[in-house]
Image (cartoon, rainbow, N blue to C red):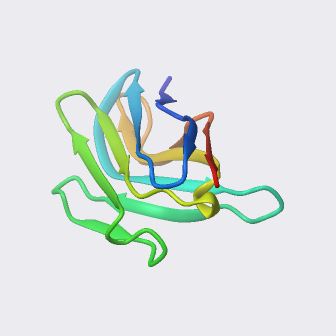
Amino acid sequence: QVQLVESGGGLVQAGGSLRLSCAASGSIFSINVMRWYRQAPGKQRELVAAISSGGNTNYADSVKGRFTISRDNAKNTVYLQMNSLKPEDTGVYYCNAFISTAVASWRSYWGQGTQVTVSS
């Protein structure tokens, strides 16, 4: 069984920074793309950033230049460094990863989410 556990959320003033972490654990054989999504109250979940196993990255236009996604393959962990935070960045941030295990082929897994609140 695979688990994704996020940490690092919290309350921060506009202009501040936070660093989110998401660690995958379990009978993991390989991890492909890892992503961060967020969901604001009353809105649909949206893709924030993605990183391939080789380190290629993609960002939503709204966070380009402010957020940086990275990963440590040895630790099965993905990070999201968030700088110059804005109130509109508020939401629940979810980690997602495409993982193969010893007993199952590739499938998508989700973390439980971590709350990020940016005050104005």
The residue at the point 57 percent across, 46 percent down is 93
**Residue extending furthest bottom?**
61
The reply, left or right, for residue 45 in relation to residue 16 is right
- 46 or 109: which is nearer to us? 46
Position of residue 2 relative to residue 50, above or below, is above
Query: Where is residue 84, by image quadrant?
Result: bottom left
Please tell me whether residue 7 is drawn above or below residue 108 in the rendered image: above
- Could you tell me residue 16's position as x and y percent? 44, 48
x 56%, y 36%: residue: 111
State how many labels appear.
0
| Image quarter of the C terminus | bottom right
The correct choice, above or below, for 59 with respect to 80 in the image is below
Q: Position of residue 85 (x, y in %)?
A: 48, 56
Seen at 43% across and 54% down, the residue is 35
Single out the residue that lies furthest toward the right.
42
* Residue 39 pos. (x, y %): 68, 56
The location of residue 13, given as percent across then percent down, is 55, 46
With 37 as the anchor, is 30 left or right in this view? left
Q: Relative to the observer, which residue lies in front, 114 or 102?
A: 114
Tell me which residue sits at (63%, 63%) in the image: 88
